[in-house]
Amino acid sequence: MLESNLATRTLTEWLDYLEQLHPSTIDMGLDRVDQVKKRLGLVPIFPIITVGGTNGKGSTCAMIESILSCAGYRVGCYTSPHLLRYNERVRISRYEASDEDLCKAFEEIELARVGIGISLTYFEFGTLAAMQLFSQSGVDVAILEVGLGGRLDAVNTFEPDCSVLTSIDLDHMDYLGDTREEIGFEKAGIFRSGKTAICSEAEMPASVLRQADLIGAHLMHIDSDFGYSVQDNQWSYWGPGGNRHALPHPSLRGSYQLRNASTCLAALDAVRDRLPVNMGDIRQGLLQVELPGRFQVLPGLPVTILDVAHNPAAARTLSTSLGSMGQYSKTYAVFAMLKDKDIPGVARALKSVVDVWLVAGIDAPRGASADDLRQVLESEGVVENGSIVNDFPGIGSAYAYACERASGNDRICVFGSFYTVSGVLRYRDAVKYRQQ
């Protein structure tokens, strides 16, 4: 009876169900996932590259996926969160998993967990579904992005052949700790004894280095064991697999992407015995990589930049990237954030480059209201540098206002959350549909 009921659920119905299944949205720990994984008999035989860190995870995953795909490998890539469709989280050979395949995987996991009386969170369920699909489709390699932290994240129940830490900064402090040292310890939990652990931030917390030494991981540190240099419109990489010269800049915008690209190449060096790539694969992969919402510049005027920056470190990077774009008469910010994020820190990082703040609330349990955001902006002195408008019913209407007011010499920057960027993308899709 249970099986017949499960078989008729749509993907939307499954996702609604998963959101209500576990008493806590976040419940860190590996025991529940591990028990269901064993029940499923889920033992991957392909290499796994696990990518954790505060910022830069998505870009690094996307570049590794692109290069390996160009090399002819069947690549499974699991990332989160998504912008428009849940299917974005699970890709095989660069194609999003279908509703049908996701529903089938969810059904198999549901039967397994009910059989042993285990409850799973939304993310835990999704992680198992992704790995189930990767195993069933016979991928050559899986790239797994850590959801939260590392040590107790569901992804960490799978054994990586190479672990990557992109950066360590203050975010998710309710779960990971109040300092970079505490957060670094949690994130370094993805390291494995005898396996390569890559650190792509020059000043990693001491806790990360201690963890690598304690378990006997083979640590590769940027600027010491690998790195890059820039020459005009090209760049070069050096690492244990040799030097790579005359590389094109990644199609992802922002000078900081070279650090992510060199980290990607270091990871590929670590698995080169099982997954060799050549220079042509690397060049093609860097040029073809796509990742919406990471300093994504939309075509047309006024210029619109989409960036999911939602913590001070990412906001500082965004500010630097905006500063390198050239001169614009005005910068309009479409701004919405979750209330459990460091809203003052993000505001401070960007107040010098924004002229008009268009503030909207996020319609979600964790969403900050427009009034909440306005109060923070005022307390941070934003009104000294620009103006604030916050009487918008939603993110789409804030963006519509920006488009009406901005001239061709202005720019619009959308940031603060995945919700903020997805709200604008949904609005643009709706406008395009009405115009057809």
Image (tube, rainbow, N blue to C red):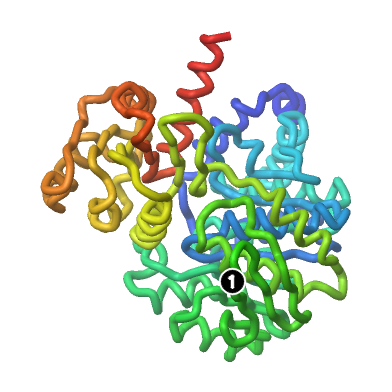
Q: Is residue 71 visible?
A: yes
Q: Pointer 1: what residue?
A: 230
Q: Is residue 432 left or right of residue 264?
A: left
Quadrant of the image containing the N terminus: top right
Residue at screen point 71% across, 60% down? 64
Give 15 or 109, whichever is nearer the viewer.
Answer: 15
Give 106 or 422, whichever is nearer the viewer.
Answer: 422
Residue 376 sits above or below residue 57 on the image: above
Residue 258 in the image, given as x and y percentages of width and height: 58, 65
Residue at screen point 67% across, 51% down? 78
Residue 266 sits above or below residue 8 on the image: below
Q: Is residue 322 left or right of residue 112?
A: left
Residue 406 in the image, given as x and y percentages of width and height: 32, 29
Quadrant of the image containing the C terminus: top right
Residue at screen point 53% across, 10% down? 435
Residue 223 in the image, given as x and y percentages of width and height: 57, 83
Residue 253 in the image, given as x and y percentages of width and height: 54, 52
Q: Is residue 160 visible?
A: no
> For the residue marked with disc 1, what is the amino acid?
Val
Residue at screen point 66% across, 53% down? 62
Badge 1 density bin: few <14, some 14–19, many ≥20, Cα 10 Å: some
Q: Is residue 436 left or right of residue 172?
A: right
